[in-house]
Image (tube, rainbow, N blue to C red):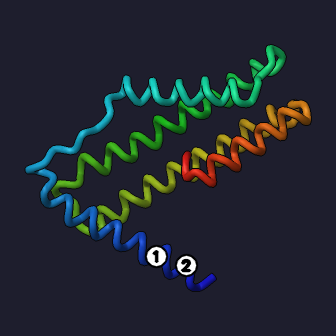
Amino acid sequence: MKTTAAVLAFTFLMSAAYAQASSQSAAATPVVMKSDAQRNMDVEKHIKDMHAKLQITPDEESQWAKVAQTMRDSAIELEKAIDKRQAMLVNATALDDLNAYGDIAQAHVDGVKKLASSFSALYASMSDDQKKLADDVFAQRVHQGKK
């Protein structure tokens, strides 16, 4: 456990140091960021894909709508944190960068917790086959390193 914590801490600190170093050249090399429209399209595609993979029934649509809205809201909050960090990188101190990473991580954690909460009612109403699909879909996303 201590080894894992040390590796994670080292990785985090190195990525922060790299981000700090690369931010110094950010003024010379603009970062390509997705437009809000592209981000929205990506989120909507993800929602549509999850809807199909989970085989949401007409009876489950109202519960699914809450899950989908949670996904949209969480994506917005995460993107705000990312955009805020991107905007301040040129003049950021190491501490600013670490705090910005913390804000991004917290937005992600908050989004996952909100998703779990909104998904729980839908999951409880699913058939056993759908629950198995959901279990597989979420396990697969974790193993593939996807959000």
Count of labels in the image: 2
Task: Using the rendered view, name the quadrant where residue 73 is placed.
Answer: top right
Categorize mark 1 by other alpha carbons within 10 Å: few (<14), some (14-19), many (20+): few
The type of residue carrying mark 1 is Ala
Q: Identify the residue position indicated by label 1 in the image.
A: 9
Q: Are the residues flagged by discs 2 and 1 in contact, CB closer than 8 Å? A: yes
Q: Residue at x 38, y 26 (%)?
A: 38
Mark 1 element type:
helix
The x, y position of residue 47, in whole percent, is 60, 27
In the orientation shown, which residue stands out farthest toward the right? Answer: 128
Type of the residue with mark 2: Ala
- What residue sits 13% from the left and 57% below the top? 25
- Check the image and report above or below for 54 versus 27: above
- Foreground pick, 114 / 132: 132
Determine whether, in the image, residue 47 is placed left or right of residue 76.
right
> Cα distance, mark 2 to mark 1?
6 Å
Q: Residue, x 54% and y 30% (percent of image)? A: 72
Residue 100 image label = none
Q: In this rendering, is residue 80 above or below 145?
A: above
Can you tell which quarter of the image residue 61 is in? top right
Residue 117, percent from left and from top? 73, 42
Instruction: Determine the residue located farthest toward the top in the rendered image.
Output: 58
Name the residue at 70% across, 30% down: 53
Q: Residue furthest bottom?
A: 2
- Please tell me the numbered disc located at residue 5: 2
Across and down, in percent, residue 66 comes to 68, 27
Circle 2 residues within 10 Å: few <14, some 14–19, many ≥20: few
102 with respect to 137 (left or right) = left
Indicate the quadrant containing the N terminus: top left, top right, bottom left or bottom right: bottom right
- Residue 104: x %, y % from top left: 44, 52
> With 91 as the anchor, is 39 left or right in this view?
right
Label 2: which secondary element: helix
